[in-house]
Amino acid sequence: MSSETEIKLDLSHEAFDALIGSDLLGEPAEVVQQSSIYFDAADRTLWNNGYTLRIRKVETARTQTVKAIGPSSALFARSEWETPVENDEPVLDHTSPLLAEFGGELKLVPLFDAVCESRLWKVEENGSRIEVAVDAGQAVSGDRLSPFLEAEIELKDGSSNDLFVFARKIEAVAGFRIGVRSKAERGFGLIEAQKTMFKSARVDLDRNMDAAMAFRAISLSCFRHFRLNEDVLLHRRNPEALHQARVALRRLRSAFSLFKPIIPGNEPLRLKDELRWLAVILGEARNVDVLLTKATDPDLVFKLKSARESVYRDAIDALNSSRSRTLMLDLFDWLECGDYLPSNGTASAAIPSARGFAERVLDKQRKRLKKDGGSLATLDDDHRHEVRKDAKRFRYAAEFFASLFDDARGVRRHKKFLAAMEALQDDLGALNDLVTGPEVLDKHGLSGHPAKDSVVSHADKDALIERAQASLDDVLDSKRFWR
């Protein structure tokens, strides 16, 4: 089975009830009880190399499905291989790439189950055929459970635009969030240590890819990074999840800036502005979290915690708002169907190769950092903050494009570049703390608190500027991994 165009929707209990009880879908054409067993080696050989294997039982029929996920999916023309099987024993043969990839000695054991009731519909939207599945179930491993309510709308024939038109009809009757976790991920999450935040993942780009497809892959990776942390933040209000959600938005906005020459039009500008709106609200909460890590005075801790309750409430309200949900659907729609993609037939100019475009972008970011940061001592705080943003954008570009320059020399140089860049960002961050700490205290009415000096930086500004300049020079002296 080839890869299909589909949208996964995460549903709350209220949204689930509203959707299956709405006139939009009516009575399901079929209700199916499914149970799946997921297998892997004891050392997670399949999962760690980008594969999953499950055996799904529907009534008396069993089907084994092997999926290539992540980087492995780029190696094949197909991403799924399905085979009927007689029992709950995995079969390793020519029907999937596992035998060739890992050999016949691979020992697979059951790790977790996924059971669900799936309601199925077949609908049409403007002539396009769409299959809808609404699932209620749970992943199970021993005595640990991970319940889920989700829907998948899959385009069987027609236009991807129609798929999003139908998704918006669902949004009108049942608010949802775009889903980014598979049932397999939920299960593996049960048998691993529970994560309180998710860091950005490496973006694997193909050297034969054009720049538009590279932008799409990078942006979808940032989108996933945000959604994973948004879910943790909504359920646990974890400071590190909030920080990573904000980082994901910042990386995504940087991608829009870096790829501006090939994504013309008003929609990218509107989306970037909306992403900034959300990032600013999360940033207010992050600023208070940073001060709380430094506070020791009991009364100041109490007042900062009170401030934290307020700014976190604002952040959660923003994430739960229809504006935020609409933004994410608009973003996902545009990434999949936008006219920047040559396949949509409306791109106005020839799209360069990803590698050639990356070389030019990295050269440009290096030149900008050199120009803006040539003399930090002569700049005011606002302009030094702009240099800090230049450095972040340069680092994000280096991370986005790393896989295009992954020969031995490129990897070695990239590692040294990142080490130099991390030192620069630490120094510029320390300078920024001199400015933001007092501003945050003032914003929350704490600028006159007796213990205020305990949470603001008292570093020697001139010494910090001198150290930051040296770190910036080290970045510029680093050999270019992209050349």
Image (cartoon, rainbow, N blue to C red):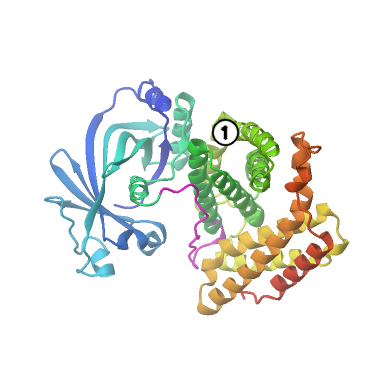
Check the image and report above or below for 376 versus 185: below
In the image, residue 474 above or below residue 223: below
Q: Is residue 51 left or right of residue 422?
A: left
256 or 447, which lies in front?
447
Instruction: Residue at 68% x, 61% y: name it.
Output: 426
Query: Residue 60 in the image: x percent, y percent?
Result: 12, 41
Determine the residue located farthest toward the bottom in the rendered image.
409
Asked which secondary structure carries label 1, the reply is: helix
Q: Identify the residue at horizontal 31%, vertical 61% (top origin).
A: 46
Q: Which amino acid lies under the numbered mark 1 shown in the image of this protein?
A: Ile
Whether residue 12 is visible, yes or no, is yes
The location of residue 250, given as percent across then percent down, is: 63, 50
The stretch of residues the image draws in magenta is 194-212
Q: Residues within 10 Å of mark 1 (few under 14, many from 20)?
A: some
Q: Which residue occupies the foreground of this view, 416 or 277?
A: 416
Taking 47 as reference, is 187 above or below it? above
* Residue 458 shown in magenta: no
Residue 471 picture quarter: bottom right
Residue 24's x, y, as percent? 39, 24
Residue beneath label 1, please? 316
Residue drawn 51% across and 36% down? 234
